[in-house]
């Protein structure tokens, strides 16, 4: 709380509270509650906001000032000022960061109450790679900037209570004790608001307890949970389980850093095809292992274990059909969509098959035959290339996907498999051949597999990026920093859709020889 | 119906003498209008005065009881032209709109109104959309007052002052036969507070009474020779009358000591920020008692010269706190000093920035710089040294991390698929010149769409593409206009112009059933029943009536494939003349507001209700985010999987999804991937639903079981 300067002092102080939210989070409700609870406690309060189009899904600020009612009218300001905020509520983590950035959080006085959940901004979502902002930097800055930092996932609490985040933010504000008002008066305010009172009070209560208990950033707790090693639970026919156990026993003999990755990869590959495929996978990993050693921390084999699994489990129609007809998937959707009681679930899938997908799913020779005849392929494409909505809760829709799933045992003979295997072998051979000359570069070659993703056109684009990145290898050969450059190329490729940044990076590489 | 309902709050408008009103600034203005016996009110919505229009619309019953006519005007020009009712008749009238954009549109009517002058009080309430949170070009309303010679009030931002300004405004208008502008800034429109109410007054003459007894006076009409007389009257009679009124009624206020070495002249709207800065400098207490002489201009045009001179003459220097540019007040006051041969130093923009909002920090910096230089004896030691700079390193670290969050399309917005289709057609046919307009659809210029090259004013999207009409060019221009802009001005200025000039471009009218960006007010083509307005006038009819031959109507914008096909046809057809596509689907914000309570009620009442929502199969999603580059929907985001094999986050749809369909449509139209699914949950299923469900689930689980018995099943991660 601010005390006025030396010359003038009326004995009263103004409490200044700002709330930063993302448009649509209900910041207006929260500010109304805050002014209401202040007035209930004999304070005069004033709130302001900026409504309008600027608010649609964008960052917004609400501002409240309050002062004990002495019968005289105080002069309140209309917007928060840097270094002059007592309580800052951020309804999302990056908004907390924005508050610190804008100078609204200062160590001499500001209690920062932030929900630690993320609402990704558009710029974070549209990168082909991982464009998300680093949460830890924000937590770290918030701890340094605030006099007190109360942060936990208030969105989760709200959703669990069937309420909205304004209720849990209000609870955290009350629980933090930053305002001199008793808990009951906050609850009275919620009751008086008259809508969704029960759920709001539940969310309020949970957040109150967390804040009162001095909840700080929960990053550490989550990290500890994730670190716990997990065994892989499996069930099935004895014969298959025995073969699975044999595979895991083989993987168990791998050096420590590789083992976890190999087990994850093995699970994926066997789930995708069968134990034989799993053995094939381990054979391939072994090739890397032979070239590897402790002095490198087994980076090559770990990368191989990871990316081989992804490469071997290419996304074909069989896989999609298989995944979409599993019991586990049905249960997951029911859980996520809260389908309970008598309610009936209907599920519509969106497919858009083209002649390419059809050929990929045909025996290799037949597929190649069609692909080799553009007129024929075009004729077929015109007949099948359109969006298809398939109801997987209906017998026809489910049945057709289930039938596609029955093709699985023949997958190895299909055209797509031949294409993918050839591609995999070229890439893997390149990495293995590079390893003795430049170990780090070989690891980076393996990591380039990350570029290949998506379906149809997106997949084609991904392949082209992959090829362009690897085309950078030639000028890099023999350079001591080749691995670093390849990593930079790959990261550039993940920055935008068309690969504009990648082209820029490739140009830079082309000029490297000059120096 | 508008986005926000004031049905409950408007009851406060009935308060009588001596009651205390608590609420928002905007509602206080409405109450003040009624207390002043206003006879008619009009306006055009737009932040920050949208809610004023919404309050008036919700208060029609009360207005009707008092005999007050209310209109939701077609544009700001219409609203201002409406004040012509006060030219010959002693009726008080008011109109309201957002500014400076509103005054830009209204200035034709404003100039005519100001020339002839008024008999009844005419008040123009302008919502000054300047500074943080503004959605328009940064200009001032001030010069409009100067060039048309109408008076401009800028009251202190608290409810009693704003209410008083309404009362003063009408009286000033009548005393000087001049329309008066009352300026309210963004935050003062939404500031909460209280004031003591008075009884509402019936207008002394209603519009009905005026119609029954028509009057005219050729001298009040803008045509020579009267127009020359008007100009003389303005400077010889009306301006002096206004100055007398402002002086005698003490519209401007003085605070702090009566004399001193230094003083501050400020716009009324700057008062709170100035006091806050003085509080922080130890020169004012929480109640505004201050050690610095303040001269607060609640009337910023015209200035009362003798008041200014009296305030300045004993001071060495005076700081003029005037937000925005050019600095008309500072220039005028400096000129007064010069003419009066005073050597008081007038400072302003040397201490405070020329451009931009005077936020708390800006004001603090400006005032302390001024006082340090010109009245250091007022400051205690701690403020004499310049402020220590904050933790800049912290801000610099964060600047690299914290993403910008500009406004964008809401969850389920029907405009999103239109721009997804446009992006797809550009992938197919190459980039085009795209002209944008004003409205939510202008968010298309932001990621992920990044479509649109210019915006030239409300309803002027297609007009701004009119130069691009070259018969030899291989490509056509595309222009967008919203339904709001279409009815505001677009029908004539854009569509009519394109027809008349045989423009060959493509025009997309984005029809979301409301003036959505301003808060969901009804317009001519709204589909809603409106008790007091005539709605349901199809845009396609208007376009055809204007003479457009090629018109396509898409009644479900979410059909991306169809929107793309319409665009493709429009861009490639041999037909000449403008190609107009009207793309219609209801604004999701308003639709949800309307439907959500009904759905909840139906479910609770045991009715069969199907609720759609989208989901992503995370094991099918490969995490390339192509879908998000065609969406940007807040409910479609990224999440990390607990899988060491995956580097990049996958798509995920959260519980806020409204099931609009864009994800599935885009996945289909752009041939993206099969990860999306739509889950329709049937609440209170009927017997047939349950029977079919039982049958289907029986068979599917038999098939699932058969397959899963023969394979390894891994527990879900």
Image (cartoon, coloured by chain):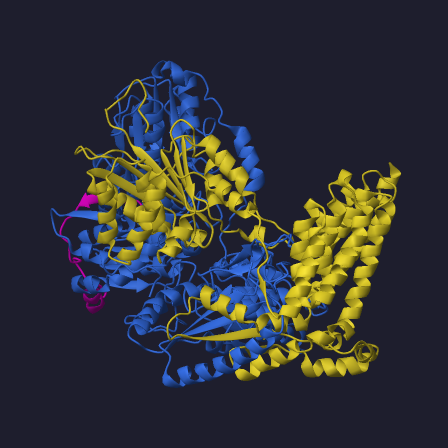
Chain colours: A yellow, B blue
As drawn, is A2 to the left or to the right of A243? left
Please tell me whether residue A207 is drawn above or below residue B95 in the rendered image. Answer: above
As drawn, is B121 to the left or to the right of B133? left
Residue drawn at x 49%, y 38% is A139
Figure quadrant of residue B335: top left
Q: Position of residue B113 (x, y in %)?
A: 34, 54
Residue B216 is one of the magenta-drawn residues: yes
Residue B561 is one of the magenta-drawn residues: no
Q: Position of residue A392 (x, y in %)?
A: 54, 77
**Quarter containing the C terminus of chain A:** top right
Please tell me whether residue A421 is drawn above or below residue A108 in the rendered image. Answer: below
Q: Position of residue A344 (x, y in %)?
A: 42, 76
Residue drawn at x 84%, y 49% is A473
Please tell me whether residue B679 is drawn above or below residue A219 in the rendered image. Answer: below
**Total marks placed:** 0
Please tell me whether residue B111 is drawn above or below residue B143 in the rendered image. Answer: below
Figure quadrant of residue B675: bottom right
The answer to which of B220 and B182 lies nearer the viewer is B182
Q: Position of residue B486 (x, y in %)?
A: 47, 66
Residue A51 visible at all: yes
The answer to which of B688 and B549 lies nearer the viewer is B688
Residue B219 visible at all: no
The answer to which of A477 and A50 lies nearer the viewer is A477
Figure quadrant of residue B164: top left
For the magenta stretch, what is the residue range?
Answer: B191-218
């Amino acid at each position: 709380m601010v005390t006025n300067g030396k010359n003038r002092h009326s004995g009263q102080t103004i409490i200044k509270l700002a709330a930063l939210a993302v448009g649509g989070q209900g910041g207006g409700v929260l500010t109304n509650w805050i002014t209401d609870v202040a007035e209930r406690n004999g304070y005069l309060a004033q709130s302001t906001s900026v409504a309008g189009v600027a608010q649609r899904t964008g960052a917004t600020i609400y501002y409240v000032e309050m002062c004990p009612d002495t019968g005289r009218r105080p002069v309140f300001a209309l917007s928060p000022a840097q270094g002059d905020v007592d309580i800052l509520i951020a309804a999302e983590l990056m908004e907390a960061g924005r508050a610190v950035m804008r100078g609204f959080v200062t160590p001499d006085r500001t209690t920062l109450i932030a929900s630690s959940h993320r609402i990704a901004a558009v710029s974070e979502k549209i990168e082909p790679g991982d464009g998300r902002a680093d949460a830890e930097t924000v937590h770290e800055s918030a701890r340094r900037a605030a006099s007190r930092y109360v942060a936990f996932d208030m969105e989760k609490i709200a959703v669990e209570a069937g309420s909205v985040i304004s209720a849990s933010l209000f609870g955290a504000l009350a629980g933090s004790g930053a305002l001199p008002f008793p808990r009951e008066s906050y609850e009275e305010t919620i009751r008086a608001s008259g809508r969704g009172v029960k759920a709001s009070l539940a969310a309020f209560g949970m957040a109150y307890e967390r804040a009162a208990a001095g909840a700080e950033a929960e990053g550490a707790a989550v990290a500890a949970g994730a670190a716990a090693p997990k065994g892989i639970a499996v069930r099935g026919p004895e014969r298959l389980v025995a073969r699975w156990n044999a595979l895991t026993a083989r993987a168990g003999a791998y050096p420590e850093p590789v083992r976890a990755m190999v087990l994850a990869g093995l699970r994926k590959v066997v789930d995708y095809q069968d134990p034989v495929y799993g053995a094939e996978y381990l054979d391939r990993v072994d090739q890397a292992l032979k070239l590897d050693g402790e002095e490198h921390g087994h980076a090559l084999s770990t990368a191989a274990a990871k990316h081989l699994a992804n490469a071997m489990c290419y996304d074909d129609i069989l896989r999609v059909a298989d995944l979409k007809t599993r019991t586990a998937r049905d249960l997951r959707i029911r859980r996520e969509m809260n389908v309970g009681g008598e309610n009936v679930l209907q599920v519509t899938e969106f497919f858009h098959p083209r002649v390419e997908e059809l050929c990929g799913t045909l025996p290799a020779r037949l597929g190649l035959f069609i692909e080799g005849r553009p007129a024929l392929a075009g004729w077929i494409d015109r007949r099948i290339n359109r969006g298809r909505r398939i109801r997987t809760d209906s017998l026809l829709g489910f049945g057709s996907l289930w039938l596609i799933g029955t093709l699985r045992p023949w997958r190895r003979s299909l055209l797509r498999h031949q294409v993918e295997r050839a591609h995999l072998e070229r890439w893997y051979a390149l990495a293995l051949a590079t390893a003795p000359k430049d170990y780090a570069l070989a690891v980076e070659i393996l990591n380039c597999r990350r570029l290949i993703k998506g379906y149809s056109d997106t997949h084609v684009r991904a392949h082209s990026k992959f090829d362009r990145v690897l085309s950078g290898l030639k000028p890099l050969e023999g350079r001591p920093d080749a691995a670093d450059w390849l990593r930079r190329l790959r990261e550039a490729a993940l920055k935008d859709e068309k690969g504009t940044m990648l082209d820029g990076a490739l140009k830079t590489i082309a000029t490297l020889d000059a120096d | 119906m508008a986005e926000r309902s004031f049905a409950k709050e408007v009851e406060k408008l009935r308060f009588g003498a001596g009651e205390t009103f608590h609420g928002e600034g905007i509602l206080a203005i409405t109450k003040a209008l009624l207390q002043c016996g206003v006879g008619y009110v009009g306006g055009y919505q737009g932040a920050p005065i949208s809610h004023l229009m919404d309050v008036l619309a919700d208060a029609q019953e009360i207005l009707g009881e008092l005999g007050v006519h209310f209109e939701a005007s077609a544009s700001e020009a219409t609203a201002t032209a409406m004040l012509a009712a006060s030219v010959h008749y002693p009726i008080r009238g008011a109109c309201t709109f957002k500014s400076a954009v509103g005054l830009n549109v209204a200035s034709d009517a404003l100039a005519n109104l100001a020339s002839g002058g008024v008999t009844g009080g005419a008040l123009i309430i302008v919502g000054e959309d300047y500074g943080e949170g503004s959605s328009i070009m940064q200009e001032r309303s001030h010069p409009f007052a100067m060039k048309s010679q109408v008076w401009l009030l800028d009251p202190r931002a608290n409810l009693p002052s704003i209410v008083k300004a309404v009362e003063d405004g009408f009286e000033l208008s009548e005393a000087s036969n001049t329309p008066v502008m009352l300026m309210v800034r963004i935050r003062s429109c939404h500031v909460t507070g209280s004031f003591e109410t008075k009884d509402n007054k019936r207008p002394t003459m209603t519009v009905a009474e005026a119609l029954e007894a028509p009057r005219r006076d050729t001298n009040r009409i803008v045509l020579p020779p009267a127009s020359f007389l008007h100009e003389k009257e303005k400077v010889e009679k009306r301006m002096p009358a206004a100055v007398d009124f402002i002086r005698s009624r003490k519209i401007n206020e003085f605070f702090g000591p009566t004399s001193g070495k230094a003083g501050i002249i400020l716009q009324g709207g700057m008062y709170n920020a100035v006091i806050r800065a003085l509080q922080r400098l130890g020169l004012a207490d929480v109640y505004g008692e201050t050690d610095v002489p303040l001269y607060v201009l609640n009337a910023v045009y015209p200035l009362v010269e003798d008041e200014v001179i009296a305030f300045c003459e004993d001071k060495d220097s005076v700081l003029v706190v005037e937000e925005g540019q050019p600095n008309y007040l500072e220039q005028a006051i400096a000129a007064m000093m010069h003419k009066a041969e005073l050597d008081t130093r007038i400072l302003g923009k040397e201490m405070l920035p020329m451009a931009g909002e005077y936020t708390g920090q800006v004001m603090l910096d400006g005032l302390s710089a001024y006082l340090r230089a010109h009245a250091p004896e007022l400051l205690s030691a701690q403020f004499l040294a310049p402020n220590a700079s904050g933790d800049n390193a912290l801000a610099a670290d964060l600047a690299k991390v914290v993403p910008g969050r500009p406004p964008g399309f809401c969850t389920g917005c029907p405009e999103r698929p239109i721009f997804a289709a446009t992006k797809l057609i550009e992938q197919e046919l190459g980039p085009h010149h795209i002209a944008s307009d004003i409205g939510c659809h202008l968010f298309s210029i932001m990621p992920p769409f990044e479509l649109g090259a210019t915006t030239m004013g409300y309803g002027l999207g297609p007009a701004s593409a009119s130069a691009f009409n070259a018969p030899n060019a291989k490509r056509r221009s595309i222009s967008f206009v919203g339904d709001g802009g279409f009815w505001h001005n677009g029908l004539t200025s854009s569509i009519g112009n394109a027809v008349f000039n045989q423009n060959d471009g493509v025009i997309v009218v984005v029809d979301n059933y409301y003036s959505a960006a301003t808060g969901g007010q009804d317009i001519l083509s709204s589909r809603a029943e409106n008790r007091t307005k005539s709605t349901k006038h199809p845009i396609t009819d208007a376009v055809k009536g204007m003479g457009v031959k090629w018109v396509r109507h898409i009644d479900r914008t979410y059909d991306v494939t169809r929107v793309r096909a319409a665009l493709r046809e429009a861009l490639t057809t041999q037909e000449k003349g403008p190609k107009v596509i009207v793309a219609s689907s209801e604004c999701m914000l308003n639709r949800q507001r309307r439907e959500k309570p009904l759905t909840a009620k139906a479910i609770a009442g045991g009715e069969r209700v199907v609720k759609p929502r989208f989901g992503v199969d995370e094991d099918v999603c490969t995490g390339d985010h192509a879908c998000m580059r065609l969406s940007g929907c807040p409910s479609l985001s990224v999440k990390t999987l607990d899988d060491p094999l995956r580097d990049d986050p996958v798509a995920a749809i959260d519980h806020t999804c409204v099931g609009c369909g864009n994800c599935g449509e885009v996945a289909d139209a752009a041939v993206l991937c099969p990860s999306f699914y739509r889950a329709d949950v049937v609440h209170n299923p009927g017997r047939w639903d349950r029977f079919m469900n039982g049958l289907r689930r029986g068979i599917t689980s038999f098939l699932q079981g058969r397959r899963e018995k023969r394979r390894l099943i891994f527990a879900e991660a």
